[in-house]
Image (cartoon, rainbow, N blue to C red):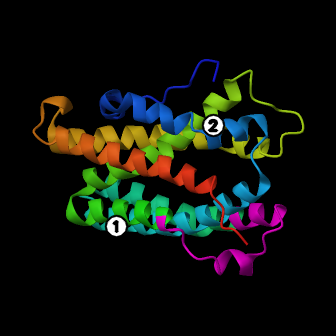
């Protein structure tokens, strides 16, 4: 893709992304993303992605609920609790409304079987939070919220993105718009605060950094798999 990519600020996020640069590019410039940008993605692929993303959001809420338990400060608890509340009180409803615009009724969405690639990703995130601490969980969550913010901003800025008569342009505007961009920046800031509390200022010198980088890489690889899943809808 052409154009200047947006960068979400954050010291730890940048340090984690650097050694996984090639993998990160395969995520943010995935064929699924490029076909959203030019409007060529088959509608069956997008519908499959939408219903799986609804299931993903449910488990994402569970991950933030785990963050409430794992947090060590009131600020960390509040951040995680706001994620749970935002998803359960607003995002799930908005997602169902958006599914309805694509002819997907609530009963159909709720009855959808979880794709194994969706299951692999969401359970990995939960496992890292259960086995580790709040920082491990925030690192596992980072490729999703920060990555989608980067993708949305990239596509909005990219002159190759088709705006007129693109059925996916509303999706692009949603993730590239100021509300989600702020969510991405908040996640990057929270990552830094969590790391500084546990690792000190020199993140990359901590013995834990290699492990955190592995978690970030694994979660990014699973995000690539989520896009792959979107290109592989079930055959009727």
Horizontal side of 69 relative to 171 (left or right) equals left
Q: Position of residue 215 (x, y in %)?
A: 28, 48
Magenta part of the chain: 95-116
Horizontal relation, residue 46 to residue 16: left or right = right
What percent of the width, then of the height, locates residue 114?
Answer: 54, 72
In the picture, the quarter occupied by the N terminus is top right
**Disc 1 secondary structure class:** helix
From this view, report whether residue 39 is shown above or below residue 48. Answer: above
Local packing at callout 2 (Cα closer than 10 Å; few below 14, some 14-19, many 20+) is many
Please state which of residues 114 and 211 is positioned toward the viewer in this rendering.
114
Disc marking residue 66: 1
Between tags 1 and 2, which lies in front? 2
Which residue, as the protein is rendered here, is positioned at the far front? 235
**Mark 2 sits on what residue?**
152
Rendered image quadrant of residue 131: bottom left
Depth order, front residue of 121/95: 121
Locate residue 139, reporting x and y percent: 33, 47
Which residue does the image show at 26% across and 52% down from the upper left? 136
194 magenta-colored: no
């Amino acid at each position: 893709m052409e154009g200047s990519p947006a960068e979400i600020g954050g010291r730890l996020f940048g340090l984690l992304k650097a050694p996984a640069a090639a993998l990160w590019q395969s995520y943010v410039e995935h064929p699924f993303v490029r076909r959203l940008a030019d409007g060529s993605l088959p509608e069956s692929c997008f519908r499959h992605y939408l219903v799986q993303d609804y299931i993903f959001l449910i488990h994402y809420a569970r991950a933030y609920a785990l963050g409430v338990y794992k947090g060590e400060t009131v600020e960390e608890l509040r951040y995680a609790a706001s994620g749970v509340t935002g998803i359960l009180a607003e995002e799930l409803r908005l997602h169902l409304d958006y599914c309805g615009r694509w002819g997907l009724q609530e009963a159909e969405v709720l009855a959808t079987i979880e794709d194994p690639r969706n299951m692999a990703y969401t359970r990995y995130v939960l496992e890292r939070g259960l086995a580790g601490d709040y920082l491990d969980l925030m690192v596992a969550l980072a490729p999703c919220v920060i990555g989608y913010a980067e993708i949305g901003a990239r596509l909005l800025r990219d002159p190759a993105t088709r705006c007129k008569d693109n059925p996916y342009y509303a999706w692009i505007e949603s993730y590239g718009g100021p509300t989600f961009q702020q969510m991405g920046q908040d996640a990057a800031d929270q990552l830094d605060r969590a790391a500084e509390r546990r690792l000190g200022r020199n993140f990359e010198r901590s013995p834990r950094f290699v492990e955190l980088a592995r978690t970030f890489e694994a979660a990014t690889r699973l995000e690539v798999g989520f896009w792959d899943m979107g290109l592989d809808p079930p055959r009727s």
